[in-house]
Amino acid sequence: MVFLQEYALDTFFKGLIIGVITGVVLNKVPNYIYSLIRNNRIIKDEVKSNSKPEPVSSTKDEYKMALLVRHDLKMGKGKVAAQCAAVSVTAYNKGKLCRLPSKCARVVLRAPDIKTIEYITEQCKQVGIQTAEFIENGNITVLAIGPAITTSIDNQVKNFKLY
C-alpha cells in the first residue's frame, strides 16, 4: 500500500512538472510573436524605386532565391529558420508582381557580416534583382535575393558557403 502511494505521488509530481513546462511554453510563444509585431520588427521590405524588375524571358527558365544569414550574430537554428521563412514569403510576394512562377529553389548561405550584406544589396540593385530584408532590433539579420533566374542569382552568391 505504501508503494502505491509513493508511486502515485511520484507520477503526480512528474505530471505537474510537465504541465507547468507546457503551460509556460504555450504562453511565451504567442507573447513573443505579439511583441515582434507590436515593436514593428517583423520585416522591412527593400523598395526599389529606380530599378526595373527582371523580365521573365520564358517558362523554361529555372528560378532561385538565395537567403543570406549573418553568421556574426550567432543566432539559433530555430530563429534562423523562422526568419528565413518570413523573408522568403515577403520576397516571393514581391516577385508575384513580375508574374514569376510559384516554384523556385531556395538556398540558405552564410554572410560573414553586415558589410557583406550591404555590398550584395547594392550589387543586386545595379543588376535589377529584387531583395527583401528581415530586420530585428534595427539590424539586418537575413537578406533574401530573388526570386530570379538561377544564373543571375548564382553570379551574385558564388563565393558564399552553405549555412
Image (cartoon, grey):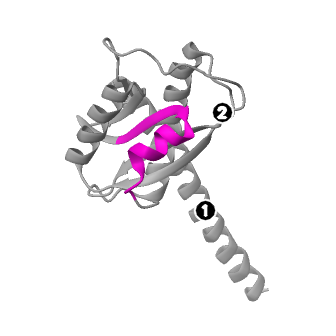
What number is the disc on residue 61? Answer: 2
Q: Is residue 95 above or below residue 50?
A: below
**Residue segment shown in magenta:** 142-160
Quadrant, the N terminus: bottom right
Q: Residue drawn at (25%, 47%), measured in percent from left and top?
A: 116
Foreground of the two, 102 or 77: 102
Marks 2 and 1, the one that precedes in the sequence: 1
Q: Residue drawn at (65%, 64%), measured in percent from left and top?
A: 15
Quadrant, the C terminus: bottom left
Q: Is residue 55 left or right of residue 52?
A: right
Asked if residue 120 can be seen in this view, the reply is yes
Q: Amino acid at mark 2?
A: Asp
- Give x and y (percent) for residue 119: 24, 40
* Quarter-of-image position of residue 139: top left
- Give x and y (percent) for residue 147: 53, 32
Q: Residue drawn at (39%, 28%), measured in percent from left and top?
A: 43
Residue reaching furthest front?
57
Task: Name the element at disc 1.
Answer: helix
What number is the disc on residue 18? Answer: 1
Q: Amino acid at mark 1?
A: Ile
- Give x and y (percent) for residue 111: 33, 53
Please name which of the two marks, 2 or 1, marks the residue nearer to the observer: 2
Does 144 appear in magenta? Answer: yes
| Label 2 packing within 10 angstroms: few (<14), some (14-19), many (20+) | few
* Quarter-of-image position of residue 144: top left
